[in-house]
Image (cartoon, rainbow, N blue to C red):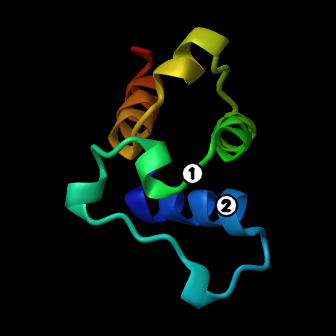
Amino acid sequence: MTLEEFEQILTSVVHGDKAGPEKAIRLPEEALDRHFEELDVDSLARAEMVTVISDTYRIEIGDDEAGELTTPRSVLEFLAAAERGTS
C-alpha cells in the first residue's frame, strides 16, 4: 500500500466515499507517527479502516494486531510486512 492509497482509505472512512478534494486527508512525514486520535480519526473510523484494509488487501487482521495499529506509520509497516509474508 502506498501512502496515497492509505490517505484515500482514511479520507473515505472519516469523511465518506463522496468526500471532495477539499476533505482529502494528507499525511506529511511528521504526521506519520501521530496517534490516530491526534489526527481526528476516532475509534469507529479506525475499526472501519481496519475492515476496509483487510477486505481490500485480503489479509486477516486480528484484534490484537488491529489494536497495535495506532499511527499511520504502524499501518503502513504492518501492510509492508504482510506483503512480504512476515507479519
Relative to 83, say whether 26 is above or below. Answer: below
Disc 2 crowd rating (10 Å Cα; few below 14, some 14-19, many 20+) is many
Q: Nearer the viewer, residue 16 or 52?
A: 16
Q: Residue at (20%, 57%) from the top-left corner?
A: 30
Relative to 25, say whether 43 is above or below. Answer: above
Relative to 49, say whether 11 is above or below. Answer: below
Q: Residue at (65%, 13%) from the top-left corner?
A: 62
Which residue, given by chain and number where applicable, does mark 1 sit on? 41
Which of the two labelled residues, at mark 1 and mark 2, occupies the earlier sequence position? 2
Tell me the quarter of the picture where residue 43 sits: top right
Q: How many marks?
A: 2
Q: Could you tell me the amino acid type at mark 2? A: Val
Q: CA separation, marks 1 and 2?
A: 7 Å
Q: Secondary structure at mark 1?
A: loop
Q: x%, y% of residue 24?
A: 55, 77
Say left or right for 81 vs 36.
Answer: left
Disc 1 crowd rating (10 Å Cα; few below 14, some 14-19, many 20+) is some
Q: Quadrant of the C terminus?
A: top left
Q: Could you tell me the amino acid type at mark 1? A: Val
Q: Nearer the viewer, residue 19 or 37?
A: 37
Q: Which mark, by number, is residue 4?
A: none
Q: x%, y% of residue 37?
A: 49, 45
Q: x%, y% of residue 47?
A: 70, 35
Which residue sits furthest left?
30
Q: Residue at (58%, 58%) from the top-left corner?
A: 10
Q: Secondary structure at mark 2?
A: helix
Relative to 7, say whether 86 is above or below. Answer: above
Which residue, given by chain and number where applicable, does mark 2 sit on? 14
Q: Tags 1 and 2 in contact by the CB under 8 Å rule? A: yes
Q: x%, y% of residue 20?
A: 67, 87
